[in-house]
Amino acid sequence: MTFDLTPEQDQLRDAVRALGRRYGHGYFVEKAKAGEHTSELWTEAGRLGYLGVNIPTEYGGGGGGITELAIVCEELAAAGCPLLLLVVSPAIAATVITRHGTEEQRKRHLPGLADGSAKIVFAITEPEAGSNFHRLGTVARRDGDDWVLNGRKCYISGVDEAGHVLVVARTEDSSTGKLKPALFLVPTDAAGLTRSKLDMEIVSPENQFLLYLDDVRVPADALLGESLDAGLPALFAGLNPERITVAAMGAGTGRYAIERASEYTATRKVWGGRSIGSHQGVSHPLAHAAVQVELARLMIQKAATLYDAGRDLEAGVAGNMAKYAAGEAAALAVDTAVQALGGAGMTTEYGVATLLGAVRAGRIAPVSREMILNFVAQHVLGQEKSY
């Protein structure tokens, strides 16, 4: 057992950290409040190869795994630039296409995902069903050689920045008559696909949307994989990378908040010339938050290692635990940092309150803390399913 990164992973961490700090949280907030995207950072990260670290080399990627992509997510977040689309496009879409797409789909989509020139977003969540694929209302039916999709999706990130959306729908199994999941690569400018922006109380340059699919017609090769049988394994293929990279982003955000607060409390002097950080009432909460963030990072490392080793079932447990731990730790770290800074903590200038909405959302999405506890109770503790 080792807790050390490889020399290549260490170099990646240092390089991404340097890139993130050149842009910084001020850039992130400025873009978000102007209603703009972090296009410059994304483009440079793609040019340097950081967006494609988990994509095979034959398609223009770095040939690494989710461990490497988690490093990218964490270090950009630790620099104050938590990019949600890292989770959606490289982690989910690229993984699903790599593992379950056809060779033609891999050749068509992966090079652009690797260099950042293309983005593919992911659409599973629905207003009524949530992300429960057993209850999805979006349906795909065959019409000649084409597929026709109808349904609604919600909380779909970054549709306005992407060329395609990976839509999870349900199709009828001709042998059983039952509906089963399938994934479709749908161009975001397809006829019948419309969107409505959701106003969110989160400071983020990445937007959330409602999607409406009204007789959206796509060709046969829009179906991900060689057949409908690819649907269920493809859907599950994206879940562990999603949880691991979301956790990494949370851990990085927690590190950023603690660093900002620690710098402030070590230099802020109020009573008798002593720094406010010399008082345990200030330093102990920050130390406690730092412990929680570090524990989350350890679980993230374990989950990523298991996933990259092909141990999907174990990675599922560890990935859910990592997401839970990082969500709690990030929320604690940002809240503690705001408290330590007092009034300054609520200003835009000091750059911590701007993350309150994002870390609170991290306890809800992409899977809530309660559903993770249900998962652990059932699959780790052997309890009867409660829902």
Image (cartoon, rainbow, N blue to C red):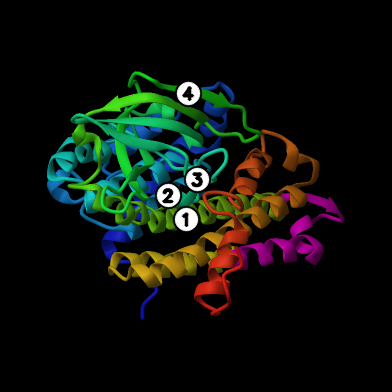
Q: Residue furthest top?
A: 191
- Vertical placement of residue 372 versus 206, above or below: below
- Vertical placement of residue 342 versus 311, above or below: above
The quadrant the C terminus occupies is bottom right
335 or 279: nearer the eye?
A: 335
User: Please, what secondary structure does the residue beneath circle 2 have?
Assistant: helix
- Amino acid carrying label 1: it is Ala
Could you tell whether 255 is left or right of 53 in the image?
A: right
**Number of other residues with Cα within 10 Å of mark 3, as a class: few under 14, some 14 to 19, many 20 or more:** many
Does residue 329 appear in the picture of this structure? no
Cα separation between marks 4 and 2: 27 Å
Query: Which residue does the image show at 41% across and 70% down from the upper left?
Result: 302
Q: Picture quarter containing residue 213?
A: top left
Cα separation between marks 4 and 1: 29 Å
Between discs 2 and 1, the one toward the N terminus: 2
Residue that numbered label 4 is attached to: 195
Between discs 3 and 1, the one toward the N terminus: 3
Between discs 4 and 1, the one toward the N terminus: 4
**Number of other residues with Cα within 10 Å of mark 4, as a class: few under 14, some 14 to 19, many 20 or more:** some
Q: Which residues are magenta?
A: 267-292
Residue that numbered label 2 is attached to: 73
Query: Which residue does the image show at 55% across and 79% down from the upper left?
Result: 381
Residue that numbered label 3 is attached to: 79
User: Please, what secondary structure does the residue beneath circle 4 have?
Assistant: strand
2 and 1 marks in contact (CB < 8 Å)? yes
Residue that numbered label 1 is attached to: 248
Cα separation between marks 3 and 1: 13 Å
Q: Which mark is residue 380?
A: none
Is 214 part of what is drawn in magenta?
Answer: no
- Residue 334: x percent and y percent? 66, 50
Q: Main secondary structure of the magenta part?
A: helix
